[in-house]
Amino acid sequence: MNKIKVSLGERSYEIIITDDNYAHLGKEIKNLNLGKDALIITNRRIKKFLGKTISSVVKRENISLHMETVPDSERSKSLEVWANLLERVVKFDRGRELFLIALGGGVVGDLTGFLASVYKRGIPYIQIPTTLLAQVDSAIGGKTAIDLPCGKNLLGTFYQPRLVYSEISALKSLPFSELRNGLAEVIKYGAIKNRELFGYLEKKEFKDYDWEYLVFECSKIKAEVVEKDEYDKKKIRMILNFGHTIGHGIETASEYSRKYSHGEAISLGMLCAVDIGNALGITPSGVWERLEAILTKLSLPRRIKSLRSEEIISAIGYDKKFRGEKTRMVLLKEIGEGIIVENIPWELINRVIRKRMG
Ligand SMILES: NC(=O)c1ccc[n+]([C@@H]2O[C@H](COP(=O)([O-])OP(=O)(O)OC[C@H]3O[C@@H](n4cnc5c(N)ncnc54)[C@H](O)[C@@H]3O)[C@@H](O)[C@H]2O)c1
Ligand SMILES: [Zn+2]
């Protein structure tokens, strides 16, 4: 079992990474003393894979358990689903000592975290992330949100969980496409903060990846960044946006065609960011080829297809990461060292995106 502490004063908590089918989960929850009644929020698919195991380890600790499901879709992060879930939580809560458990990927995690943060001005919650993306990224750091019709993650809070419990064996049932989504974030962590991790992804074959090592290294990076800039106010947490500025533009532009998933879009975004770094003399030569080789190995895209560059550019323009007119992006000084750079010419961004098209 590996433990990482996220040190945030009275909001501190542990990330536990295990590969033993949730053997320690019950005890770890019990030790936190969060209440007598646990309410798990999940979806039917995850319930099918993990519902029984989780129920039995929690119940063994004499904690009462109830499970609610939401649809398996990003649409669960809507006001409608959220309000419906809230009603069910209120009904269950009568006379209880309630805490919430998010069992699932980023969708369930964001939705549950948001609910926990505002219900009764905040009740405790635990994250049990079951996708690679949630284990290395969304479950850690306390950003919670639901979507509004005019944009993703527009209604949210900062609200830290009391525990993140990442069980590696849960990833076995995850489709390859979802693993790749998470791996794009893993590549990002290596590129901005950990040269060895990047080298590991380069050298090892996919089938030999040690998932516990990957989740551990990425969780450590995320925890360290969050500790320094919990509320994303100091231009530190922003480093995690490597590949995400142009990536979000591509994701938004492909929203209706669903051409690119998040991981695919940020893979393209990372390549563009390296191109920009090269053009500005910040990123040395050779980085682009190394990044491209990993993306090729993992069947992540290297070219932007079936989208119009104008759509991508206009989506980036609306991205909240570009405050005002100032363009701000994360670029690489070298592999393992990301830096935040401001005032990148629009013309260069445009040119780099067009070069990646077709
Ligand atoms: N809060 C944050 O800091 C943060 C960071 C990044 C992303 N996010 C959010 O995370 C969401 C994306 O999360 P995601 O990529 O985990 O997607 P997801 O939650 O939709 O999960 C992906 C798919 O995998 C399935 N699944 C989950 N666990 C499984 C398992 N063990 N076996 C088989 N199938 C399983 C889910 O049912 C779903 O179909 C987005 O809404 C995004 O905005 C939040
Ligand atoms: Zn991301």
Image (spheres, grey):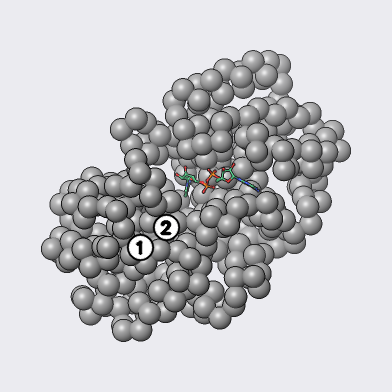
Coordinates of residue 219 in the picture (x, y in percent): 57, 60
Instruction: Determine which residue is flagged by label 1.
Output: 268
Question: What residue sits 34% from the left and 73% below the top?
Answer: 332
Amino acid at circle 2: Glu
Assign the N terminus to one quadrant of the image.
bottom right
In the depicted structure, whether residue 204 falls above or below residue 273: below
In the displayed orientation, state which residue is furthest to the bottom. 285
Coordinates of residue 153 in the picture (x, y in percent): 40, 39
Q: How far apart are marks 1 and 2 (CA)?
A: 7 Å
In the depicted structure, whether residue 263 falls above or below residue 87: below
Q: Can residue 196 be seen in this view?
A: no
Name the quadrant containing residue 342.
bottom left
Query: Tag 2's secondary structure?
Result: helix
Q: Residues within 10 Å of mark 2 (few under 14, many from 20)?
A: many
Query: Tag 1's secondary structure?
Result: helix
Instruction: Determine which residue is flagged by label 2.
Output: 264
In the depicted structure, whether residue 133 falls above or below residue 188: above
Question: 193 left or right of 128?
Answer: left
Name the quadrant containing residue 235.
bottom left
Amino acid at circle 1: Leu
Question: What residue sits 70% from the left and 29% below the top?
Answer: 67
In the depicted structure, whether residue 150 falls above or below residue 133: above
Observer-nearest residue: 26 or 47?
Answer: 47
Callout 1–callout 2 Cβ contact below 8 Å? yes
